[in-house]
Amino acid sequence: MSTSSLPTKTDVLIVGAGPIGTTVAITLLRNGAKDITIVDGSREPSKIGSRAVVVHSRTLEVLKPMGITDELLNRGIVSRAFTINTPTSTLIPGNFGSLEARPDVAFPHALLISQCETEGYLNKKLEELGKRAFRPLKLVGLVEASDGSGLEALFESGEKIQAKYVIGADGSHSNVRTLAQIGFHQPDHPEVDDISNKIDPNTPPLIVCDVYLANPLPPSLSRTDIAIFFGIDGAVIIIPLPCDPNDSTKRPIYRIIAMVPQTRGEAPKNADAAFIQSCVDRNTRFGPDKSAEHAIVESVVWTSRFRTRHGVADRFYKPFGKGGVFLMGDAAHIHSPAGGQGMNLGIREAVAVGEMLAPFVTEGKPKDEKLFEEQAVKRRKIAIDVINMTNGIVAAGSLQGSFVRALRDWVMWFAGRISYFRSFAGFRLSGYYTG
Ligand SMILES: Cc1cc2nc3c(=O)[nH]c(=O)nc-3n(C[C@H](O)[C@H](O)[C@H](O)COP(=O)(O)OP(=O)(O)OC[C@H]3O[C@@H](n4cnc5c(N)ncnc54)[C@H](O)[C@@H]3O)c2cc1C
């Protein structure tokens, strides 16, 4: 869409058309809002770089009324179980069994699908509802409107727009957050300011990549379930992904996430097949010493080096005149990809805020500061809980020293014999635990 048709006023300005901005836009439109504007600084939606590959049970449920869940289920891989392993044994055969026992849970499993495909379905839905993001339109200024009606936003192009409400869904380096003067801190170290550019020295970098594995696959490598290994370098996670629909040979694709400790030198920015192979060989049961079980990395589809950071915005809602700023998604909280939580949490927030805000714009009601603030406090509490959980997973995966590792493995092995623990881990990740 051409930026020349950008309106001068809007009820809701959504900054960022990633998965979270798109979800809040769809939710507002579905709930009767008409005058919303969504902008994105990039020229087009990203088509590569499948960051979030796990869509959890509760997320599938909140996407259902939008008519997206069926398409996701048709394309993705339904995953009902996962294992936590050492290179030689399975510690916890985890599952989503506790969800199956609950009558209120429609999708008692996770779904494995790349983020760019999930975003593709969200964008298609937004277009069906008659909206597209204005691109490229990068927010560079945000001030309270002089007439007290809300905010005035300025873009790099020089264009301006007045909005009663601004939703910051512009990712971890959020300009909305900075311009609204909302701080960003580590929840456990509130003195550590603006961590968005700082690296946590205590956690090793991760190589995150999607690879083609050679056929035939190792007999015990699942095409539906996630395998987590605690190896000598730390955690390595192997996640099956749907085949490329354009690949007639249907070569199997897997997401591999591998911790790279300092002892292995600088983690490569663009890991090649040989480096990824070495991570698999050193840390999983699919190493070369078991020839039938050896997983061979044939080629790399996409790769990225990820430095784990975690932080949370000081507030998720801030009033401006008769309106205000809402933060959500990575603009509000960031953490390790362990547990596949970021996009899932953001989508659930986007639906909750969209549903809450819609009546205020459709019926022109004055804002309800108490309601907005209460919801923001609740969302922030949930985000901190998710940050703590992902920090725990990273800490368990990166333990140093053979004694503590052996102790960890023993505790996990013991927990893995108890049915409650086997399904609790799945429940904790599903999104139902925090709501
Ligand atoms: C390697 C990796 C693996 C991950 N795995 C998982 C997983 O398995 N499961 C999971 O749930 N999550 C996962 N995540 C996290 C997930 O990718 C993010 O939580 C999710 O993308 C957040 O969406 P968002 O819309 O908030 O931000 P983004 O996806 O970052 O989108 C922000 C949008 O805002 C736009 N923008 C930025 N600045 C401006 C500006 N000034 N003006 C206008 N537009 C702007 C950008 O162009 C972009 O389109 C992973 C992340 C990484 C890095």
Image (spheres, grey):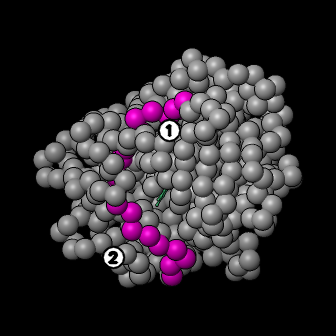
In the image, is residue 136 above or below residue 398? below
Which residue sits furthest top? 370
Q: Amino acid at mark 2?
A: Pro
In the rendered image, which quarter contains the N terminus?
bottom right
Residue sitting nearer the eye, 294 or 185: 185
Can residue 433 be seen?
Answer: no
What's the residue at 55%, 48% (across, down)? Answer: 142
Q: Which residues are magenta?
A: 299-319
Can residue 305 be seen?
Answer: yes
Q: Quadrant of ligand 1?
A: bottom right
Q: Amino acid at mark 1?
A: Leu
Please name the residue that numbered disc 2 is placed on.
268
Percent x, y of residue 78: 65, 50
Residue sitting nearer the eye, 183 or 88: 183
What's the residue at 74%, 77% (across, down)? Answer: 246
Tell me the number on the disc at residue 429: 1
| Number of residues whose C-alpha sits closer than 10 Å to that of mark 2, classed few (under 14), some (14–19) or many (20 or more) | some
Residue sitting nearer the eye, 126 or 406: 126
What's the residue at 54%, 44% (across, down)? Answer: 143
- Count of labels in the image: 2
| Number of residues whose C-alpha sits closer than 10 Å to that of mark 1, classed few (under 14), some (14–19) or many (20 or more) | many
What's the residue at 48%, 48% (across, down)? Answer: 179
